[in-house]
Amino acid sequence: MKRKDEYRKIYETSFSDDSVWIDWMMRRVYDNSEVMLIEDESGAKAASGLLLRSYGWRYFGADLDMSYIYGACTLPRCRAHGYMRRLIDESLRRSVERGDAICTLIPATRSLYDYYSAFGFSPAVYIDRERYTAVHHFENPGLYHDAEAVYDEFHRLEMESDNTVSHSADDFADILDDLHFDGGDAFAVASASDGRISAMAFAVPHRDSIHVKALFADSVEAKNAVLSLVRERYGELMTVVDCFVDGRRRSLERHGMVRLLDVFQILNAMAASDPLLNCTVRVRDSRIAGNSDIFTVSDGICRRGGTTANLDVGIDTLASIIGSSESVGRLMGLRSTHFRLPLMLD
């Protein structure tokens, strides 16, 4: 049986997606170079599988590489036998070999957060959820007009942040297709003064609400303008907006996990972004030997080695620190900003 057919069989026994969506996923998302499979005890059939997808990651102005674990699944008869544990370990090894700086995932259930934490993943990705009642009015006083949601403008808006995934043009096409399967769409507004796109929203309607899965905006006015388009399309329903964490802490929810794969890459990019940064960190990592070291950040670069450190942390704790607020980073002697992982297939 081909690897593609093996993975599809495992996927179909594990998830409730309909056959039309699975056909699309196997045609558009699946890639033989990204599939990871592990055989059962007989060696005749694959017991577990996942896709180890590749993305860019923008980190303090540096372009790094990120892996994303998608569609991790095991045949029902093979569960609780350690197959997935072996597969996750192998996925981390492959990610390190190809030079990825971090690995991310979005657990399918809350209980899986504890499962993945055993591999050094930290629940460091959060969303700040806003809720607007059906009677809320999103004002658009003529400052913006409708625009087409195109990749180049989406990428510009996405790259205005740091510590965020970077989607390719193909990824963007897949995002739109996935939205359309659920009756959703992407919306954009442009400034009436210069024609530049100022906000973009990705929304899916439900029976009694509208879910805005991601929203990028350069001002509150632009945000209201694009949400008014969403409301016009789908009607006056409760609107739930997944926002990036900005410190106001309205209703934070866990949205994903991060596993640091190459501490040197990360701290070197951090150091380059702030030559005045000065900190020595001892990192402990039971799975990736190259991360267990003392790292000194100073003069715009990162160096390995040393005997003392002013910060001593495990690999998961380090991810939590660099994905926290700026104030937490300053307290620890590092730069920090919240992780952003929007619009991933989950």
Image: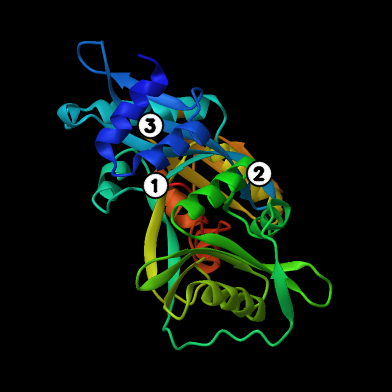
Three-letter residue code for mark 1: Asp
Q: As displayed, is residue 302 above or below residue 189? A: above
Kindly identify which residue carries mark 2: 169
Observer able to see residue 314:
no
Q: What separation in Å lies between label 2 and label 3 (alpha carbons)?
A: 23 Å
The nearer-to-camera label among 2 and 1 is: 2
Residue 314 position in % (x across, y down): 39, 45
Observer able to see residue 4:
yes
Nearest to N terminus: mark 2 or mark 3: 3
Kindly identify which residue carries mark 3: 50
Numbered circles on residues, count: 3
Residue 195 position in % (x across, y down): 81, 69
Three-letter residue code for mark 3: Leu
The nearer-to-camera label among 1 and 3 is: 3
Circle 2: element type: helix
Residue 228 position in % (x across, y down): 58, 78
The nearer-to-camera label among 2 and 3 is: 2
Circle 3: element type: strand
Q: As displayed, is residue 339 above or below residue 3? A: below
Instruction: Give neighbour class at mark 1: few <14, some 14-19, many 20+ (Cα, 10 Å).
Output: many
Circle 1: element type: helix
Nearest to N terminus: mark 1 or mark 3: 3
Residue 312 position in % (x across, y down): 42, 48
Kindly identify which residue carries mark 1: 316
Taking 314 as reference, is 164 left or right? right
Instruction: Give neighbour class at mark 2: few <14, some 14-19, many 20+ (Cα, 10 Å).
Output: some
Please tell me in which quadrant of the rendered image residue 295 appears: top right
Taking 249 as reference, is 298 left or right? right
Please tell me in which quadrant of the rendered image residue 255 appears: bottom left
